[in-house]
Amino acid sequence: MKFIFAGNLLRFVDYSKEVEIQGNTLNHCLDQVTQKFPALRSALFDREGRIRQTHQLFLNGEQLASPGGHGAPALLERPVGASDTLYILTAIAGG
Amino acid sequence: MTVQALSELGASPSADAVEGYARSELSGFFASRVNPGAAERDAQNTCLPADIFREAAQLGLLAYLLPKEVGGLGGNRRTFGLLLEQIGYLCEEVEFASLLSLYADIPTLICDTGERELIERYVVPMSRGTRFATFAYTERTDALSFSSRAVQRGKHYVLSGEKCLQTGGQLADTFLTYVRDERDDLQLFLLEREDPGVEISPVETTGFRSAGLTRLRFTDVELPDSRRIVPVDGLSHVQKFLNNRRLFVACPFVGRMRAIVEDCVLHLRGVVRYDKPLTETQAVQAKLGGMYIRYETARAVLRDALERVGGRHQNPLFDPVISAAKYTVVEHALAVAKDAIYLTGWRGFSKELPFERYFRSFMGGIAGQTAQDVIELLLGSNVVAQVELRLHKEKT
């Protein structure tokens, strides 16, 4: 599947806006992309391994509800293929 | 002036009702207690005194946002925003409204923990104005690169780092401090002024000078687990907090803009040039018209954003409409204060009139609760993403 990164996350993926990853599920692909870019892991996930709420995830243009919430494990086991696109939109203020 | 009058406003009063309440119940407080010392505090670079906030607490203003179960008034953020707008009109020191909103808002974060001990120790005295808190987030880098750290040592946490700017820190007993843990997650701790290893120093600025700005340093400060109030994903926690606060910063600016336009007219009526008051000169009227348009634009944008607060359309972490409203209000406020200086010439530039002070105070909005250029960047990035997402959706 294809990942598209924007904003604050770009520096954690060597400023590659689009990244192609092989995987069967969303979770698998997230695992693969953070293996490819290790610094991305702590930016994307909290200490309990959940996606931070500040990131908005869109699969093929549709927003995934609460990817960091309680329903997340089932959501992230969703099967994906080569034609799918996950857009991660992040707006972090302050600093 | 009673707490009852504030609670009787109800859950969703009209803007006119809020204005009526402020005029009848609050104008005397500002006229007698706050306004007389505003210029002096700015000139001397001194913070607003704690007793003014204790008096504000007696009016119910510091308990307004807290739930009734903990002694609050159970008010909502939309109405509090309207109230801040009116306070901005009545109060000649926007720093007061900024600190008031902060000191009223911070206890809600502690209250959200639901921990009875924390509520008794912090929230109740804060609602009475006998204890104050601010938040310590900003460092000299982006949030994903913060260097302030918490290291777990047995049942305790040891905190070290520096936070370069806090509003209201000079009065604060407690600093809600965001630091990174060993997994680079942000956690939120309650640091107290008296904790060994805590150093607080004033920060001098060109404006917003009575807002008690500080720098916080903490070195090997050992805290029990009970002082850790957000143990995971503090980054999202602070984004929600900033998202909400962004609008509160803008509210009093709108009220002050209205006061500036009116004060300008009052002053210019008494200035005679070529045998007639300046207010009878078309060029002056046109400038005043431009200032009025800026005020009405800012007010319309602010009130539209306030109606979104807490609603289902609001993005709780970064709401574009709220951020655009804060940006718009600050830019118009700066322009109105500058126009007042244009119209009043050397008097407006001098301390004879308050317009130069308001201009410097409004400059606090450039940096406060997300800098204006960062808002532009985030909104630009967001709009690009929305269009790209729509294209993706259309393609699939």
Image: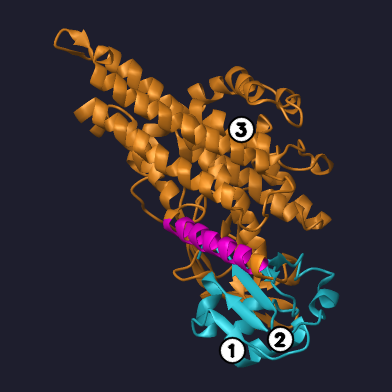
Chain colours: A cyan, B orange
**Left or right: where does residue B365 sit relative to residue A5?**
left
Inspect the magenta stretch and tell me whether residue A45 lies in it.
no
SS assignment at label 2 = helix
How far apart marks 3 and 2 lie (CA) works out to 47 Å
Q: Position of residue A94 (x, y in %)?
A: 52, 62
Chain of the residue displaying label 1: A
**Left or right: where does residue B263 sit relative to residue B177?**
left
- The magenta region covers B373-393
Q: Residue at x 83, y 54 (%)?
A: B116
SS assignment at label 3 = helix
Residue tagged 1 = A37
Residue type beneath disc 2: Cys
Q: Nearer the viewer, residue B158 or B85?
A: B85
Residue type beneath disc 3: Leu
Inspect the magenta stretch and tell me whether residue B386 lies in it.
yes
Q: Is residue A47 above or below residue B230?
A: below
Q: Quadrant where the C terminus of chain B lies?
A: bottom right
Q: Residues within 10 Å of mark 1 (few under 14, many from 20)?
A: few
The answer, for residue B92, to whether it is visible in the render is no
Q: Position of residue B267 (x, y in %)?
A: 30, 18
Q: Position of residue B63 (x, y in %)?
A: 70, 39
Residue type beneath disc 1: Phe
How far apart marks 2 and 1 lie (CA) works out to 12 Å
Residue tagged 3 = B82
Question: Magenta stretch mostly in which secondary structure?
Answer: helix
Q: Nearer the viewer, residue B251 or B202?
A: B251
Question: Quadrant of the rendered structure where residue A38 is?
Answer: bottom right
Residue tagged 2 = A29
Q: Position of residue B90 (x, y in %)?
A: 50, 25
**Left or right: where does residue A42 sit relative to residue B359?**
right
